[in-house]
């Protein structure tokens, strides 16, 4: 992502932040609690 910083599609980035990261966080919580 850093190498293509100026080529990033901000819509895709925002969608990832809004939709994918919360799901990833939920999946990681049990692992982090151990």
Image: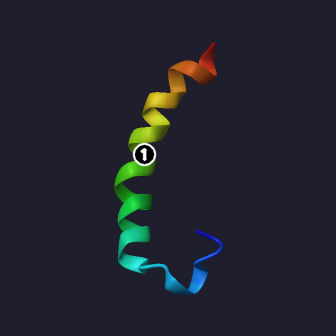
Above or below 26: residue 21: below
Q: Residue at x 37, y 70 (%)?
A: 12
Q: Quadrant of residue 1?
A: bottom right
What residue occupies the far bottom of the structure in this picture? 6
Coordinates of residue 15 in the picture (x, y in percent): 35, 65
Q: Residue at x 34, y 54 (%)?
A: 19
Of residues 5 and 16, the one nearer the viewer is 5
Coordinates of residue 21 in the picture (x, y in percent): 45, 49
Of residues 32 and 5, the one nearer the viewer is 5
Q: Quadrant of residue 18?
A: bottom left
Above or below 18: residue 25: above
| Residue named by callout 1 | 22
Coordinates of residue 16 in the picture (x, y in percent): 40, 60
The quadrant of the picture occupied by the C terminus is top right
Of residues 15 and 5, the one nearer the viewer is 5
Above or below 12: residue 22: above
Q: Secondary structure at mark 1?
A: helix
- How many numbered circles are shown? 1
């Amino acid at each position: 992502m850093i190498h293509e910083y100026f080529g990033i599609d901000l819509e895709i980035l925002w969608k990832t932040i809004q939709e994918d990261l919360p799901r990833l966080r939920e999946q990681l919580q049990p692992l982090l609690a151990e």
